[in-house]
Image: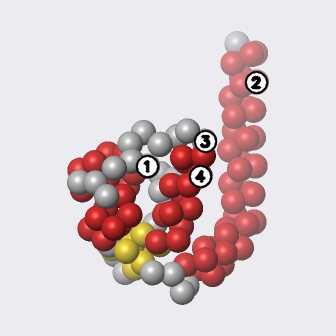
Amino acid sequence: MTGLLNETVVEREIQETTTKCFEKFKYELLASIKEATEDEELLTRAQVTKRILKCSPNTADKYYLNDPTFPFVYQGEEKRYPKKLVTQWIAQKASRGGMKYFG
């Protein structure tokens, strides 16, 4: 029982520390994202699928767009995909052997 309690305490401490760190750096992170995408071409789902991923929309959803690390920003209520960040994401995934499919 003591081991389980200690694991729970440790997990809670990790979560609290993570939250504090995120709160501390979120404005810097948001500013960095804004700067990186300010003059960036923002693509729609159809554009990023056709022009960059070169695959069907279903394949794009399955292998890329639903990946939580795939870069996007909201423009109003719609997702937009910064062209530069998308190409960087693809290069990083490919260099680590993490690409499941690339059309």
Q: Quadrant of the N terminus?
A: top right
Of labels 2 and 3, earlier in sequence is 2
Q: Which mark is residue 96?
A: 3
- Residue count near mark 2 (Cα–Cα under 10 Å), binned few <14, some 14–19, many ≥20: few
Residue 92, which numbered label? 4
Type of amino acid at the residue the image marks with label 1: Asp
| Distance between mark 2 and mark 3 Cα atoms | 36 Å
- Asked if marks 4 and 3 touch (Cβ < 8 Å), the reply is yes
* Between 74 and 103, the one nearer to me in the picture: 103
Q: CA distance from mark 4 to mark 3?
A: 6 Å
For this view, does 28 lie left or right of residue 97?
Answer: right
Outermost residue, bottom direction? 39
Report the label total.
Answer: 4
- Pointer 3 or 1: first along the chain: 1
Which amino acid, mark 2? Answer: Asn
Dot 4, crowdedness within 10 Å: few (<14), some or many (≥20)? few
Residue receiving disc 2: 6
Q: Residues within 10 Å of mark 1 (few under 14, many from 20)?
A: few
Amino acid type of disc 4? Gln
Q: Residue furthest top?
A: 1
**Which colour scheme appears in the figure?**
secondary structure
Q: Residue 13 appears at what percent x and percent y? A: 75, 41
Measuring from the top left, give residue 35's x and y in whole percent: 63, 81
Q: Which residue is mark 1?
A: 67
